[in-house]
Image: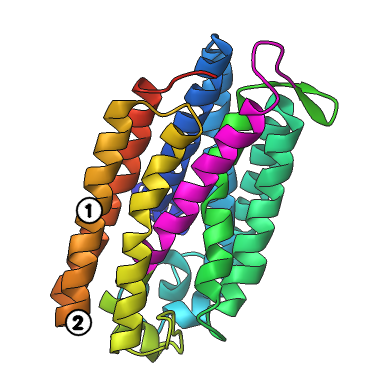
Amino acid sequence: MKTFISDFNKLVKLRLTLTVVFSASISFLIGAKQQGEVMWLNWVLLTIGGFLVTGAANGFNEIIEKDIDKLMKRTMDRPLPSGRMTTGQALVLSVFMGILGTMVLVKLNFIAGLLSVFSIFLYAFVYTPLKQKSPIAVFVGAIPGALPPLIGYYAAFRSAGFGLEYAAVSEAAVVITPLVLFTIQFFWQYPHFWAIAWVADDDYRNAGIRLLPTTKKDSTSAAMIFISALLMIPAGFLPMYYGFGGLVFTIVSLLGGLMFTWYGYQHYKLRTDASAKKVMYVSFLYLPLTQLVLLFDFIPF
C-alpha cells in the first residue's frame, strides 16, 4: 500500500496538483467574497474535484510520455517508466479521476465543469505531444495552466442553465475578475517554465524535448526570460486598475514583479543554471503569495 500511494503521488504529480488546487480554491474564495457568502461545502467539493481533474490530466500526460520519461533523470523513477505500474492501471486511474472530477465540478457549476474538460484535453492531448515538436508548446500549455482561477471562480457561483446566478454581483465583475486572474497566471508561466526549461535543458535534450524559445541556452532565450519576468510588473497592477485589488496587494505584487525583473536581468547577463534557478525560485514564491494577499485585500465591485 505504501508503494502504491507513493506511485499514485508521482502519477498525479502531487506537488503540481496541489499548487493547481490551491490556485483554484483561492479564486473560489474570491468569487464567494464578491457575493458576500462562502459555501464551504462547495469549496470542499471544488478542492476534491479540482484534485481529481488535475490528477487525471497529469496521469494522461505520463501515459503519453512514458517512453520519454525513461530517458530523463528527473522522471525515470515515475511509476510507468520504472515498470511499477502498467499503462492499463494508469489509464483506469486517470479515466476514473477525470470522469469523477468533472462530475463533481459540473454539479457545482456547468461552466467550471466545461472548463475542466477543456483543460484536460488541452494539457494532455495538445500540449503534451507538442512538447517534442516545438517550443510553442509553452504558449499552448500556459492556457490550461491558467484555467484553474477561472474554474475556481465560477465554481463559487450557482448555475443557471449554461450561465451563472449573480444577483449580488455586477455583470462586469463576473467577466473582468476571473479574466484578470487568468491573465496574471498566464503571464507568470513564461518566466516560470522557461527558467525550469533552462535548468533542465540537458535532461530535456536527452528526450528530444526543447522548450526554450530558441531551443538553446543562448542570449535570445535569456532575453525572453527577462522580458517575460518584466511583464509581471504591469500584470500585478491589473486588479487595482479594474477596481478589485487593494493597495497592499498592489505593493506586494509590485515587489514580486521587481524581484522577477531583477533576477531575470541577472540571468540575461550571466546565463547560468544558477541564475535561472533564482528566477524559478521567485516564481514559486510569487504566485501563491500574491493570490493569498489578493484574497485578503480584495475589494468587491
Q: Is residue 14 visible?
A: no
Up the image or down, 216 lies above or below 186; here it is below
Q: Residue at x 73, y 33 (%)?
A: 106
Kindly report the distance in space between the C-alpha atoms of the residues bearing marks 1 and 2.
Answer: 19 Å
Left or right, 95 with reference to 246:
right
Left or right, 275 with reference to 237:
left
| Range of residues picked out in magenta | 165-193
Q: Residue at x 65, y 34 (%)?
A: 175
Residue 271's disc number: 2
Question: Is residue 267 located in the magenta-colored stretch of the structure?
Answer: no
| Badge 1 density bin: few <14, some 14–19, many ≥20, Cα 10 Å | some
Residue 238's disc number: none
Q: Amino acid at mark 1?
A: Leu
Q: Report the front residue among 94 and 289.
A: 289
Residue 52 location (% of width, % of height): 56, 42
Residue 40 location (% of width, % of height): 51, 14
Q: Counting residues from the N terminus, which is met first, the one under dot 1 or under dot 2?
A: 1
Q: Which residue is mark 1?
A: 258
Up the image or down, 212 lies above or below 5; here it is below
Q: Residue at x 60, y 23 (%)?
A: 156
Please, what secondary structure does the residue beneath circle 1 have?
helix
